[in-house]
Amino acid sequence: MAEATPRMGLFERYLTLWVALCIVVGTGLGHFMPGAFAALGGMEVANVNLPVAALIWLMIIPMLLKVDFGAMREVGRHWRGIGVTLFVNWAVKPFSMALLGWFFLRHVFADWLPADQIDSYMAGLILLAAAPCTAMVFVWSNLCRGDANFTLSQVALNDAIMVVAFAPLVALLLGLSSITVPWDTLALSVGLYILVPVAVAVFLRRWLLAHGGEARLERVLARLGPVSLVALLATLVLLFGFQGRQIVEQPLIIAILAVPILIQVYFNSGLAYLLNRRLGVAHCVAGPSALIGASNFFELAVATAVALFGVHSGAALATVVGVLIEVPVMLSVVKIVNNTRPWYEREVRAQ
């Protein structure tokens, strides 16, 4: 029997429109009210913006409430999906971004870019690709009805690998003898976006199940759904508001830097999706696998770019472009994953 498709609410049905409006509103507010957004942007600890962190909490805690932590031991049965994601994240994505950056920045668009910044732009792109996403993946996974247990396990595994692999990988691709990793940013981000939300979700889930059972948990999740999407849209307004002036003043450079990032996202998500399909992995695992394989840990990338090259460098600008396009582009990937589900499952059933 085919799985029933959940009825979409107002936000889900017109999400593309809301995203477009938030981009316009955020850019406009950031351009005309730079002082207010500078104050919000300055509310940081270890390069992690606290207003954005609070909004991400509102997004991901409802997602984590869906995780049956008692079933986490069974996630090993998804070893093929985990293997595909690790392969794309660590063996493909950083190198494909280096190749795309070389092609577009050094050749196709070289005449439109300041020559003394091309190396710095390249560094920013590589820093983006070398850090798999931590927090927003829970949102993308939820929107494509992904397996929550798989998503949490995959993110935790990527974080563990990132601690030992991020600096050597970036050093290799940038040709630098040493990389200054902002460990405080990495540790704070993992704590804020993984450890604390998981602890809160475990406590709330147990309390709800003990005081009303599954029925109460489902009612609470239904009420929190719109809260998550409103927080997502508010995050978009903030991210574009923080860079409103740069978007208006440097539209050509931002558009050029967006080209390799866009291609990289679609290439890596498509590669992970097709590999999972070829291996017969369930769609509820293939969806988040593709999304984790394509998205970026932009907080770490921005912090590393600032630490290595300075806040006004081309590297910092390139990582900021990654921040700007993360939400709308990943939402488009979610749409593709959802729309191709029947096609995907036909191949899996035929195996």
Image (cartoon, rainbow, N blue to C red):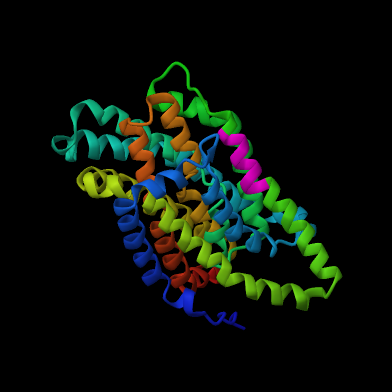
The residue sitting at 75% across, 62% down in the picture is: 68
Q: How many marks?
A: 0
The residue sitting at 48% across, 68% down in the picture is: 344
Q: Is residue 205 left or right of residue 293?
A: right
Q: Is residue 287 left or right of residue 200?
A: left
Residue 190 sits inside the magenta stretch: yes
Image location (x, y in percent) of residue 335 = 43, 67
Location of the C terminus by quadrant is bottom right
- What secondary structure predominates along the stretch shown in magenta? helix
Location of the N terminus by quadrant is bottom right
The residue sitting at 45% across, 77% down in the picture is: 13
In-front residue for pair 276/222 = 222
Position of 82 relative to 208 (above/below): above
- Give the magenta range: 185-194
Position of 245 relative to 57 (above/below): above
Q: Is residue 125 left or right of residue 115?
A: right
In-front residue for pair 294/321 = 321
Q: Is residue 277 visible?
A: yes
In-front residue for pair 146/346 = 146
Image quadrant of residue 101?
top left
Image location (x, y in percent) of residue 63 = 63, 62
Image location (x, y in percent) of residue 208 = 80, 69
Task: List the single residue furthest toward the top.
Answer: 177
Residue 84 sits inside the magenta stretch: no
Q: Is residue 330 left or right of residue 247?
A: right
Image location (x, y in percent) of residue 257 = 28, 43
